[in-house]
Amino acid sequence: MDKLEERMIEWGEALLSVHLPRWEELPELDLYMDQVITLVDQYLSPIIIQPEKNARLTPSMVNNYVKKEMIPPPVRKRYNRKHVAFLIAITLLKQVLTISEIKNGILFQGKAIGIRNAYNAYCEIQEKAIHQVCLQATKQTYEEQVRVIPIEYLAAHSASKAFANKLLAEKMIELETDYLKKE
């Protein structure tokens, strides 16, 4: 059991410093599809570790998001900061929501507070949710502020917590499975 606990603490400590790039940190240059895939993969690889289970992002996924009007079409096969922001959010959210739920949520957020503000707020909310499960994993106490969440952020908060808890559950089950194999 000590090894199990030790591995969970290591995982939690590794994720405590997770940072999602804010709008201003995303590249200003237009990128080709393969560059966008690589960039999103770099941003999300510390969080979504098992691409063989659920590919983080593929060209066909990007093309489908364009077809479903979840992201704007590329201009001359190039993608900009807005595309990268959408793709980061969609890739994380699809771990816990359906594509149509994500599309409606993005449309609502964009209309309610603007794409840039919605993206930055989502990154902050998701980081906090991951941070909380990391504190649980590392056996640290934390006080969760109980506050009223504005209605325009309620879905983002709920999805972020669901994703973070899913990460924690998947990691714990992975470690438990390894433990059982060795017993």
Image (spheres, helix red, strand yellow):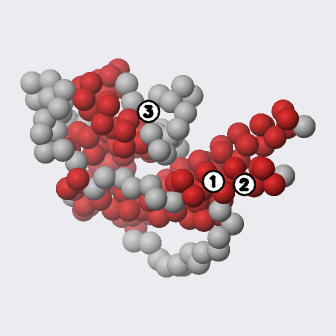
Q: How many neighbours does mark 2 have within 10 angstroms: few (below 14), some (14-19), or many (20 or more)?
A: few
x and y, in percent, of residue 3 in the image: 78, 50
Q: How many neighbours does mark 3 have within 10 angstroms: few (below 14), some (14-19), or many (20 or more)?
A: many
Q: Is residue 111 left or right of residue 143?
A: left
Residue at the spot 53% in from the left edge and 78% down from the top edge: 145
Q: Which mark is residue 56?
A: 3
Residue at numbered disc 1:
10
Residue at the far top in the pictured view: 60
Which amino acid, by three-letter code, is at mark 2? Answer: Glu
Determine if residue 112 is in view: yes
Residue at numbered disc 2:
6
Answer whether labels 2 and 3 touch (C-beta < 8 Å).
no
Depth check, front residue: 78 or 6: 6
Q: In this view, does 183 lie to the left or right of 51?
A: right
Answer whether labels 3 and 1 touch (C-beta < 8 Å).
no
Answer whether labels 2 and 1 touch (C-beta < 8 Å).
yes
